[in-house]
Image (spheres, helix red, strand yellow):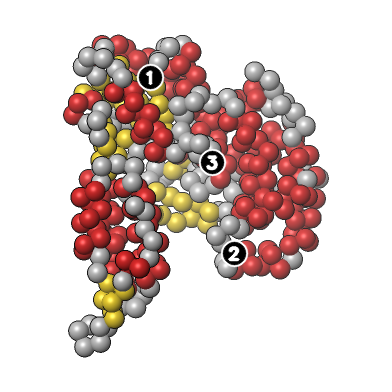
């Protein structure tokens, strides 16, 4: 395929940097670092532009913290000025990378998303004759194990713009900050030369590109007709279980020797008639339900918000925003009973029995 050049100048173009600033500040306009950057916006953008022109830009220090969602993850957040640079890069190269992807890769793409992935899997199951089996492959500790040398090799095959490649190398290797993104969450030990920081815009872009190698192998070497990927979760659908076992062994070898990754123990072959968990849903040929873990998480969150409302730590709008999001998820599956249960239980009371104030969510629009 075509190798691209002349992109670096487009990245540091002032208008591109300004649009990148607008994207980076979206839904964060009141944060202190965003306000500080905005107060001297033109000066800060010109400073970034000059650093990129004269190749003096270095990635800032990461702020690290852990989240449990649902398992422990290390999040690494860059200063706002670095997020502007990442958006400037993303705006100029992501659409070029997207052209290389297969139609059934659904993560982090316009027109993609979990619902489309779920719908496509159901269609594959529904239109496969006989006993249907689903091979699920999942990469072990994916973001923490992406090999920098392999990723840079992929980027060199796509771009011949030396300045761009050097900028991408600085972000990937992060010489300034040590580049120790390959962390073992259990022990805290770190390894250089591997890993992408969870929280970076470029990380999700690079992660999608990295596994496009597996997509191309599955489609053009293994000639898999019914294959889907959502980030590092891959599924193959077939009515020949032995054929899926062969695909499993071949894909495992490809991951090991070409991408330097390992499949985890969740990889398996399932009977479609028993239901297949994928992208937060459980899928059959004739219906789709929200996974039990997702439903419990939803209920726990709404219970927390109900208690927060009772003690004055949340208002009706806070609860409504979460409720609309959850009901939107339920629109894409057979979730009528869960929806009715949530709406029935979500009664908001503030001030106790002596001074009761009830928030009535029924006056707010929610998805039908």
Q: Position of residue 248 (x, y in %)?
A: 33, 18
| The disc label shown at residue 29, or none | 2
Q: Secondary structure at mark 3?
A: helix
Separation of residues labelled 1 and 2 (CA atoms): 43 Å
Separation of residues labelled 3 and 2 (CA atoms): 23 Å
In this rendered view, identify the residue nearer to me: 256 or 200.
Answer: 200
Density class for disc 3 (Cα within 10 Å; few <14, some 14-19, many ≥20) is some
Q: Does the rendering let one see residue 345?
A: yes
Q: Position of residue 340 (x, y in %)?
A: 22, 55
Q: Quadrant of residue 169?
A: top right
Mark 3 and mark 2 residues within 8 Å of each other at the beta carbon: no
Q: Is residue 156 left or right of residue 224?
A: right
| The disc label shown at residue 226, or none | 1
Q: Secondary structure at mark 2?
A: loop
| The disc label shown at residue 319, or none | none
Looking at marks 3 and 2 on the same chain, the residue that comes earlier in the sequence is marked by 2
Q: Quadrant of residue 278?
A: top left
Q: Is residue 346 left or right of residue 260?
A: left
Separation of residues labelled 3 and 1 (CA atoms): 27 Å
């Amino acid at each position: 395929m075509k190798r691209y050049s002349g992109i670096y100048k487009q990245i540091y173009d002032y208008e591109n940097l300004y649009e990148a600033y607008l994207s980076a500040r979206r839904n964060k306009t009141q944060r202190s670092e965003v306000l500080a950057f905005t107060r001297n916006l033109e000066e800060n953008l010109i400073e970034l532009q000059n650093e990129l022109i004269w190749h003096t830009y270095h990635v800032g220090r990461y702020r690290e913290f852990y989240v449990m969602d649902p398992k422990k993850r290390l999040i690494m957040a860059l200063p706002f000025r670095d997020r502007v640079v990442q958006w400037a890069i993303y705006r100029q190269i992501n659409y070029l990378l997207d052209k290389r992807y297969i139609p059934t890769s659904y993560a982090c793409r316009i027109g993609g998303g979990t619902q489309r992935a779920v719908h496509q899997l159901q269609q594959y199951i529904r239109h496969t004759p006989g006993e249907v089996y689903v091979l699920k492959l999942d990469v072990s500790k994916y973001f923490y194990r992406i090999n920098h040398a392999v990723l840079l090799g992929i980027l060199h095959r796509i771009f011949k713009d030396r300045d761009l490649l050097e900028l991408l190398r600085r972000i990937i290797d992060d010489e300034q900050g040590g580049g120790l993104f390959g962390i073992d969450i259990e022990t805290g030990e770190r390894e250089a030369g591997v890993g992408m920081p969870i929280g970076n815009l470029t990380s999700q872009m690079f992660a999608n590109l990295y596994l496009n190698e597996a997509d191309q192998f599955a489609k053009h070497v293994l000639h898999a007709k019914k294959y889907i990927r959502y980030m590092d979760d891959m599924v193959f659908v077939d009515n020949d279980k032995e054929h899926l076992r062969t695909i499993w062994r071949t894909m495992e070898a490809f991951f090991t020797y070409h991408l330097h990754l390992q499949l985890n123990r969740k990889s398996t072959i399932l009977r479609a008639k028993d239901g297949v968990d994928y992208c937060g849903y459980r899928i059959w040929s004739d219906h789709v339900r929200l996974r039990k873990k997702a439903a419990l998480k939803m209920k726990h969150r709404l219970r927390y918000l109900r208690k927060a409302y009772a003690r004055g730590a949340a208002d009706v709008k806070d609860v409504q925003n979460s409720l609309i999001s959850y009901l939107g998820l339920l629109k894409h599956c057979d979730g009528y009973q869960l929806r009715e249960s949530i709406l029935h239980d979500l009664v908001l009371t503030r001030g106790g029995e002596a001074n009761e104030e009830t928030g009535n969510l029924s006056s707010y629009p929610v998805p039908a």
